[in-house]
Image: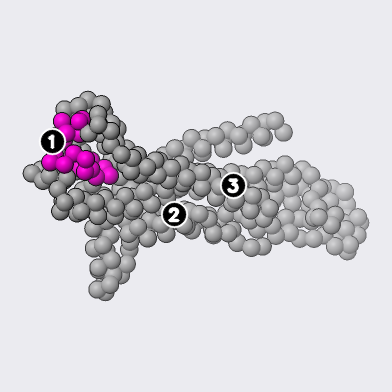
Amino acid sequence: MKKYPPTNIRLFCKIFEWAHLHYEPNTGTWRGFLLQLFCYFNQFIAVLQVFLHLLNTVCRSFHYMPEFYQMLAEDSAMIFCYFKVYLLYHRYSEIKYLADFMENSFSNADESITNKFRVKANMTCLVYMMSVFSIWASLVFQFLLPITKEELANRSMVYKTKFPSRRTFTNLYIPYVDESELAPMIVLSIFEMYANFVLPLTGIAIVGLLPALIVHLEGQYKILSIRVENIGKIHTDRKGRLIHYTNIETNEVHILTTSDKSRRIYLHKNTRIRIHQEYEQNYLKQIVQFHQKLLIFHDKVCCVPSLEIIRVSNLNHKVSLCCFFINN
């Protein structure tokens, strides 16, 4: 049986590394040391953007309340996003462990189910990613629209810059610097172009991480539920041959040959019942071990603070499994 295919969780880890918001090179070499410094530089850029935007809200936007409320909402969103980035930075090894666990320990016993939920996970992540991209694109489109006379008058009153028609993508405030002048405008534009490329890229990875985990787990529980449905039934393969499962996670089976069947006919009835009961007990034991492995994965996920919502999913899966046993 093939291993569980690579998940999009691995892609999210790579995005986090490509954005250089987390990197663990060999700092004993000059290249590794410079890459680590570049990672710290990107973290500094993110913090600086949040700080300058918050400074603009506190020092200038309060002169006009609609502008103040809008800036306050943007501050809240930026602080929340950076908080998530900060958590993932310090819990990156645990996120990577989850990706390794899924690829090395998840069951691929039914490839049709695995492929179905892998496609579903990719599509779900794509929807979430497109939502983040749509928000970012709408902000860019709004920025490119011409400024109305009323908005120009409001900006002149609030920001008191020399050229109110010149504006940056996000309103940043540097004390004693007029950002509407040419030199500061160029520097801030380059700064924002870089920050608004790195952070949305990381935001896409953060938003798609949790839905992907839930969908892949759903696929594992689907495989588990099929095994649970087969408790007490006669197990056969697609060709109708009698089989005994030796490992339900890897779909390893022992095919009962004609000689095995003939030998069992001559066994005492109680002996045949005992052999069948031993197999049923072993089959049930495999199901319990499979379920325990999924619960271990849940516990690892719940240790990551940025994925605390998975606790709700964990409870829902347990309740669903209990309801299944009760109804059947």
Q: Earlier in the sequence, mark 1 or mark 2?
A: 2
Per the image, label 3 sits on a secondary structure element best described as helix
- Gap between marks 3 and 2, in whole Å? 16 Å
Please state the horizontal and vertical placement of residue 294, each as a whole percent of the image.
Answer: 55, 47
- Residue 21 on the magenta segment: no
Q: Earlier in the sequence, mark 3 or mark 1?
A: 3
- Name the kind of residue labelled 2 in the image: Phe
Q: Which residue is mark 3?
A: 120
Q: Which residues are magenta?
A: 153-173
- Name the kind of residue labelled 3 in the image: Lys
Q: Residues within 10 Å of mark 2 (few under 14, many from 20)?
A: many
Q: Earlier in the sequence, mark 3 or mark 2?
A: 2
Q: Which residue is mark 2?
A: 12
In this rendering, the label closer to the viewer, 3 or 1 = 1
Q: Residue at x 33, y 40 (%)?
A: 145
Per the image, label 1 sits on a secondary structure element best described as loop
Please state the horizontal and vertical placement of residue 124, each as a whole percent of the image.
Answer: 54, 44
Between 125 and 178, the one nearer to me in the picture: 178
Give the dominant element type of the magenta stretch: helix, strand or loop.
loop
Q: Which residue is mark 1?
A: 160
